[in-house]
């Protein structure tokens, strides 16, 4: 099954099961601040600019189905963007520039286990994990005003582990700070020579997240 078909099938299945079983459904939005586990360097004059394919900022949107008091399957679609840049303002507008950019479109699906802390009803924690499919953009570089060849990558799959805490909840809305670990690598597309530190592109890392839920 192709990735796009899998995405559509998974979301449709969750919606169908929820509708037939009259199961509570929550729309979720997620903001992520990523920190990669591997960093490389670009040079900017005598300075160094660290960058990581696993870092960046991202957003996700999806659904969470609640068929039981504890188990909740979910599916989200998202986008992650990484930019590292340094510029100097000179006589010729930008006198010097170095940058790295990389992005990816992601699909995440998994299962979380919800439970109360210390046998209370107002302190709720979710832990779980799942799989992710990512379609990468091109990695683009410029170093001391010299534009380097961009790199294309193949689609990849990996896994997630996550935990979140329900900091606020009412009848309609929940707010959850969370932490997620992503494991994923991208292999270059084609036969062009790629620097060792980007072959493969190590996009694993941690996401500091805020999850907003809307109960339907």
Image (tube, grey):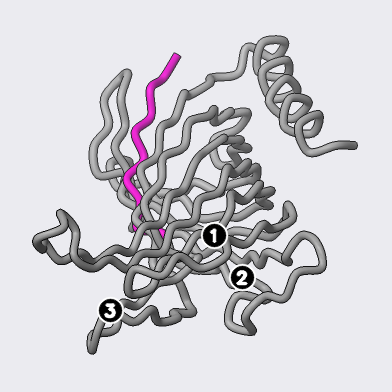
On residue 17, which mark appears? none
The residue beneath circle 3 is 44
At horizontal 31% and vertical 50% (from top left) the residue drawn is 177
Per the rendering, the mark at residue 139 is: 1
Q: Position of residue 62 (x, y in %)?
A: 53, 29
Q: Are marks 1 and 2 in contact (CB under 8 Å)?
A: yes
Residue 94 left/right relative to 15: left
- First in sequence, mark 3 or 2: give its number: 3
Left or right, 87 with reference to 30 = left
- Nearest the viewer among 152 and 73 is 152
Where the N terminus falls, by quadrant? top right
Mark 1–mark 3 Cα distance, whole angstroms, equals: 18 Å
Q: Which residue is mark 2?
A: 201
How far apart, in angstroms, are the residues tagged by discs 3 and 2? 22 Å
| Of callouts 1 and 2, the N-terminal one | 1
Question: Which residue lies most toward the bottom here?
Answer: 46
* Mark 2, secondary structure of its residue: strand
Q: Position of residue 79 (x, y in %)?
A: 49, 41
Q: Is residue 120 magenta?
A: no
- Please indicate whether residue 205 sits to the left or right of residue 86 in the image: right
Q: Do we see residue 119 in this rendering?
A: no
> For the point 34% across and 68% down, which residue is it?
145
In the image, which residues are magenta?
A: 207-216
């Amino acid at each position: 099954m192709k990735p796009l078909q899998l995405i559509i099938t998974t979301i449709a299945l969750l919606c169908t099961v929820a509708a037939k079983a009259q199961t509570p459904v929550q729309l979720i939005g997620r903001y992520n601040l990523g920190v990669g586990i591997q960093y490389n360097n670009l040079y900017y004059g005598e300075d160094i600019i660290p960058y990581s394919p696993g870092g960046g900022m991202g957003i996700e949107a999806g659904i969470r189905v609640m068929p039981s008091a504890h188990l909740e399957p979910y599916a989200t679609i998202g986008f992650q963007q990484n930019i590292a840049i340094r510029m100097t303002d000179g006589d010729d507008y930008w006198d010097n520039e170095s940058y790295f950019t990389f992005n990816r479109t992601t699909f995440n699906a998994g299962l979380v286990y919800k439970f109360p802390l210390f046998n209370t009803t107002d302190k709720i924690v979710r832990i779980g994990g799942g799989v992710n499919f990512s379609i990468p953009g091109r990695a683009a570089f410029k170093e001391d005003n010299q534009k380097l060849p961009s790199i294309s990558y193949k689609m990849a799959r990996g896994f997630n582990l996550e935990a979140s805490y329900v900091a606020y909840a009412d009848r309609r809305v929940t707010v959850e700070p969370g932490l997620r670990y992503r494991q994923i690598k991208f292999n270059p597309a084609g036969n062009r020579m790629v620097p060792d530190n980007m072959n493969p592109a190590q996009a694993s890392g941690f996401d500091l997240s805020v999850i907003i839920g809307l109960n339907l």
